[in-house]
Structures are given as structure tokens and as C-alpha cells.
Amino acid sequence: MKSRLKLLGLVAVPALLAAAVPTAYAAGTPQPHSTRAAVTGDVLKGLNQNATHTGNVAAGKRISVAISLAPRNDKALDTFVAKVSNPRSSSYGHYLTTRQFAARFGRTDAEIKQLKDYLRAQGLTVGTVHSGNLLVDASGTAAQLEKAFGTKLSTWKDTKSGRSFYANETAPTLPTAIASLVSDVSGLNNRAQLHHQAPSTVTPHNGPGGGYTPAQLKGGYNVSGTYTGSGQKIALLEFDGFQQSNITKYDTNYSLGSPTPTVQKVDGGSGSLGDGQVEVELDIEVLHAIAPKANVTVFEGPNSDAGEVDTYQAIVDSGIPTTSISWGAAESARTTSNINAVDAVFKAGAAEGLGFYAASGDDGSDDAGDGGTSVDYPASDPYVTGVGGTKLTVTSSNAWSKEVAWSGGGGGKSSVFKIPSWQTAVQKSAGGGYRQVPDVSAHANPSPGVSIYSQGSWSSVGGTSAAAPEWAAFAALYNQQAAAAGKANLGFANPALYTASGTGFHDITSGSNGDYSAATGWDFTTGWGSYNAATLASKLLG
């Protein structure tokens, strides 16, 4: 998918109303609510300007949706995350369990029952209620969804790409008391398709492909042989699959002895192998290169709005502390409410001590490709570490020699999120008071890229898809050291990384990504720069 949203204000739901729901929504019973409210921001903008209406969605077409609920005490949640992520706070590292999060910030069981009763009364099938009580899956026919959410589903053809898709013509509505709980209904459109930040085709080679080997990557970033990621877990968010035979070939060639990755399919998985296979195999092999003994779980979900939010939630449900993300899209390619829905999952993850590392895109400062400046989501999310791209040069002994900004590395300012408090110390006037991207960077230049074995041949592959797992691997190595020292996992890393103020980083001061140039300290092309694993871990451990 190439896709990279604002929570509604909460309205208290009277206890008597919640208790009355079972009979109030029973089939054939007069509805007690004559008013409905819209889920703000949950409709595609400019449909008539950049797409052609082609008809109506067939009434019997089955569609799955994921309904996101706004957290209770959202401001208190923000405060909690800020404290547990701040190394200077006495609460640093005191994360919540999934059960504690649900009790403190999730919707109540009565509120969840209210929503479920309503959905079932409309003929929908209610699926999983995810941990945290903030996400409910449901499915039904187009006609049932139109009735339940008070909107019309139409078919369209994108003017630019020619791709056909469906979308709701107006924002979904719900009975007012229920609408006050809901922040997004993902799945009412399937326009956005997240793309992977790596080439879909690669040039095969007979040997290891000419890209950087595990030894070169570890040497360049000063990864100690003492730490291998043993005992650590890393998740990968993917919208395609992989072939284990390719991973085995890579591991065997470099004598890595890595554990076999585990696959967890979400909502039925990602379907048959497509051109994203190279992405998935790149991600796994880069993790094996730097943290060879870490256990990798590949979460494979459908490339859709509902599939995306469900896959992120499945990762949070798993409790895996580190996730690498190489799929995304420009912020402008999404609805506002969908961004908010994904952001809420990341925030919950941060409260539970989970860290997400996302590729910042391979289109430089113009992620949307419209001639302006724009950034990729989810790298721009305030609860995600956005990873930009560099070109790394190592010596003959595999030590770091020099590094410059890669021209394709995504970076710039968000058009959605205001600048978070931990980033204000490096606020740039060009940022205009908005979230600045990326936070960090690593090797992404395609020539040389990294050596991988994919689709039956050796290749050299680049892109920020290589950089994101390079950072996720570091987080796993750090967590191994932290565990040995009796300290907490790194979790949501940005506050700690910014507190380090450049210590433990290779400061990259040359190169550009289009509208922005590298400079001393934090910049829009490489963030703080790439890591020196030994010195950065030492700084973070205190």
C-alpha cells in the first residue's frame, strides 16, 4: 500500500442508555434515537475532481470494516505516554500491560456492547473486539453497511491511475450516542493502496548481488558481536508474503543461524504472492543481518484501510516490543479519520512500551509526487520513529567511513500533526510548527544497496525499506542489553533519542532530498543521522 488522522470530542454516555441498548436496537423495535451524527473526516476529499463516478456498489457485495473508538481520557493518555517515554521522568519505562491499558483508557464493556448491539440490529456480523476495547471488526453486505452507516457506496475510476475503487459518498453517520464514541470506520473505501518503499523489480546476480553484507552493515554501524538480538522479538507489518526458501538461502550463505520467521495472518492474510515479495524478504533479511538471533514475526494483512488498522492492532495485541514498517503513502492519500485511527493504535502501543520504526519514503521531499513538499505516513506519526535514507561508505575493514544523505530519502514537515514537545528543541522555521520528519536515518542508497536473496536470485536492493529494519534491529539489540542490565525496553524511542542530542549518532551534513539539505545537527533529510550502536546504546542506558 502506499499510504502513510483527529479524534472526535468525547460525549459521556448515560448509564441508563447503555443498559437499554439490547431492547432499543432489537429488530423491529422503534429506534429511540431520531438524530444521527457524522464521523467527521471519514470521507475522501475531491472525489469528483480526481475520479469519475462509474456506478453503485452491488448491494450484495460483502465488505469488512474496522470501527475505531476514541480512547477514554485521551489527554490523560497523552500525558501518560509522555512520562513513560521520557528518560528524565521517574515514570520512564513503567509501561502498561494490555489489560491495564484497556481498564484505564479503553471503552467500557457497556459501550462496546452498545456498539455491537447496534451493528447486529443492522444485520452486520460482529467480529473481533481487539484488546484495549478500542477497535471492533464487523462485516456485511454493501446494502447493510449503507443502512448501518447512513451513506451511499459508489464505484469510481481514478483519473490519474485508471484504477477502479469504491468509496462512501458522504461521511458515515451513527446514532448520536454511538457516534460520540467512534473516530473512524475503515473499509468504506478502498482507494488507498499502501506501497512498499523498495523497488518491485530487481536485477538478479549470480553472487551475493553487490550490496552490503551483514558484516559491512554491522561494521558500519559499530554493532558489537556480543549482542545478536537473542531472546528478543521483532514484528514486521507486511501486505505481501515471502518464500522461506529465499530466507534460508540468505541465512545459510552468511552463516547467520537465524530462527525461522513466524507468520501471523490478519483478516485472512495478504493473498497470493505479488510484487511486494521483495519487500518482505528484504525486511526479514536485513533484520537477520544485524540482529540474527532475534525472533521475527511477519504480520500479513490485506492491503486496505481496514486491513491496515487491524494489522497494526494485531501487532499491539501481540505485545512484540519492536516493529519495522516499510509500507506507507503520502498523508494526502488518506482520510483524516483513518490517520487518527492508526495514530490511536500507535499511541496505545507507546503506552504499552512498543516501538515502531517506519520508512520515510523514497520520493525525497515530494512524497505525494505533486510538485510540492509532503511526507509519508506513518513515518510522520508522532508516536512512530520516522527513518530516512543515507548512502553509507565503509572501509576495507568494514568500519564506518562516511555517510551522506540519499537523494530519495523522504523528509519534510507533516500537514497533519503539530510538532510534538520532544521535537521542539530542534524546531525549524521551515517546519511551520508541524511534526518534522525523519527522526533518524540509515543506509538506503540503492547503489550499493544491501545484499538480499529474493525470488530465487541474489540482488542489491535499496530504499528506506532497508533503513527501517536497520533501526528496528538496533532497537532489538538495545533491548537485549537493557534486559541484561535490568532496565526497561526502549519502547517509543523518540523522546529518548532526542534527549541524546546527537550523542551516539553519525551526524550527516552533506547531500539533499530535493527541497531540503543535510546540515549539522537535526535536519529534514536524515534527522539526527545514523546510529553508532555501541555509543548510542551506552547513552540510552545511562
Image (spheres, rainbow, N blue to C red):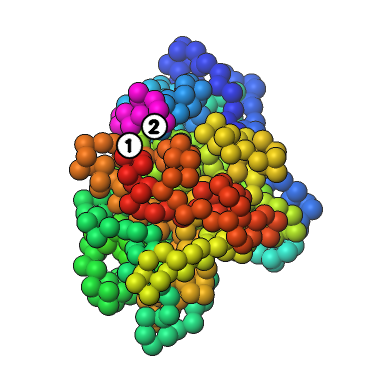
Specify the principal SS of the magenta part.
Answer: loop
SS class, disc 2? loop
Q: What residue lies at 46% left-to-right and 36% top-to-bottom? A: 499
Which of disc 1 and disc 2 is earlier in sequence?
Answer: 2
Position in image of residue 496 (x %, y %):
42, 38
Position in image of residue 510 (x %, y %):
60, 60
Which of these two is toward me, 418 or 41? 418
The residue indicated by pointer 2 is 87
The quadrant in which residue 30 appears is top right
The residue indicated by pointer 1 is 542
Query: Is 81 drawn above or below residue 520 in the view shown?
Result: above
Query: Is 319 drawn above or below residue 33 in the view shown?
Result: below
Residue that extends furthest to the bottom in the rendered view of this protein: 206
| In this picture, residue 263 sits left or right of residue 428 | left
Q: What residue lies at 49% left-to-right and 64% top-to-bottom? A: 402
Query: Is 96 drawn above or below residue 253 in the view shown?
Result: above
Find the magenta span and give its range.
86-99
